[in-house]
Amino acid sequence: MSSTGQQHPISLYLKVWGLLFVLSTLSYLVDYFHFQGYLRGGLILSFMLLKAGLIVGVFMHMAWERLALIYAILLPPLALLALVGLMAAEADHTFITRLLFFR
Amino acid sequence: MNSTVSMTHPPSTPVGAVAGWRGLVTDWSSDREAFHVSWGKAMMWIFLLSDTFVFSCFLIGYMTVRVSTTVPWPNPSQVFALNVGGADVPLLLIAIMTFVLISSSGTMAMAVNCASRRDRINAAALMIATATLGETFVGMQAFEWSKLILHEGVLPWGNPMGAAQFGSAFFMITGFHGLHVTVGVIYLLTVATRLLRGRYEQTGNYQIVEIAGLYWHFVDLVWVFIFALFYLW
């Protein structure tokens, strides 16, 4: 890799740009057409993760970085999934307690 | 040398090591590279990692209050609707804001591309375009906030539509994101001005544009999560 940075064709960025527009439109349409339940959640999360992957991978050049950097940046956030799980369980517990005692 | 000896007689200070504050600085900057990228880029990535944790804690806090409340959560689709020609279009302003921010990411990616070809004029122009789109985003956010506070009566401690936590989560999360966009606009304009003045001509090293780009794409990335988890959920 040269000291001036990575070199990729402009067309790649334009394609990703277009793709991000399409994915954003699709996630907007999920709300517009009032999808509900697991379908809604699944679609929103899928489009979100696809967009995040495109931004981090292509726009931030993570796809072409060395593995050491990729793991150093992408592995620690997995700890957040544990926090999501813990807090979801805690929030459910609070909700049930409130239903039992504060209504 | 066995382990007992090394325990009782710890190795003496290496030859050439400096003591005191100078020693501290020397030790921490003694040319050890783990990532084989410039220090600026590595540091920006590590900063962004820490920022990921901050934003995630806000979003997880939002999830916690939303799941645990017994009062119905206001429907974001209706709260953020925009009246166009007599009809309420759900989330219209938010959709436009999303497209503006994605476009700014696109122009930023092209600015980085120009900088890596040492085309400093186009790189600076594209960075100014990026900053303009970012400022447009902040402007629309200011409009959204004032509409919400003045017309819908949403405040951090309550609102007429439902759960009081809606306002606190909303203002905290979007406010912190808007602050990041504002800082990013200032950052981009600073680097663009330096590019135009030819500050990086001598070294020929334009990686600062790529590093500024990392920050900007991250701001866009955070918005992707806020858009999905707060506005659409």
Image: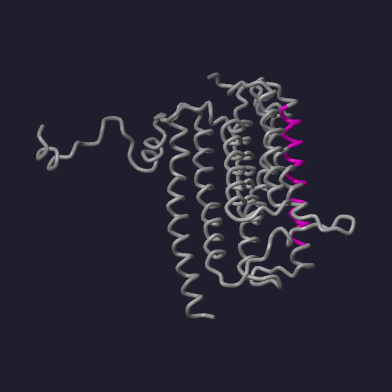
Coloration mode: one colour
Is B69 on the left or on the right of B193, as rendered?
Answer: left
Is B77 on the left or on the right of A37, as rendered?
Answer: right
Q: Residue at x 62, y 36 (%)?
A: B212
Residue A12 pos. (x, y %): 66, 25
In this rendering, the answer to whether B233 lies above or below B211 is: below
Main structural element of the magenta stretch: helix, strand or loop?
A: helix
Span highlighted in magenta in the image: B123-146
Residue found at the far right of this picture: B85
Is B82 on the left or on the right of B74, as rendered?
Answer: right
The number of callouts visible is 0
Q: Nearer the viewer, residue B159 or B202?
A: B159
Residue B182 pos. (x, y %): 69, 48
Q: Residue at x 66, y 72 (%)?
A: B158
In this rendering, the answer to whether B227 lies above or below B78 is: above
Quadrant that contains the C terminus of chain B:
bottom right
Q: Residue at x 41, y 30 (%)?
A: B34
Residue B53 pos. (x, y %): 50, 50
Quadrant that contains the N terminus of chain B:
top left
Residue B231 image-quadrant placement: bottom right
Is A85 on the left or on the right of B151, as rendered?
Answer: left
In this rendering, the answer to whether A94 lies above or below B44 is: below
Residue B230 pos. (x, y %): 63, 56
Residue B134 falls within the magenta-colored stretch: yes
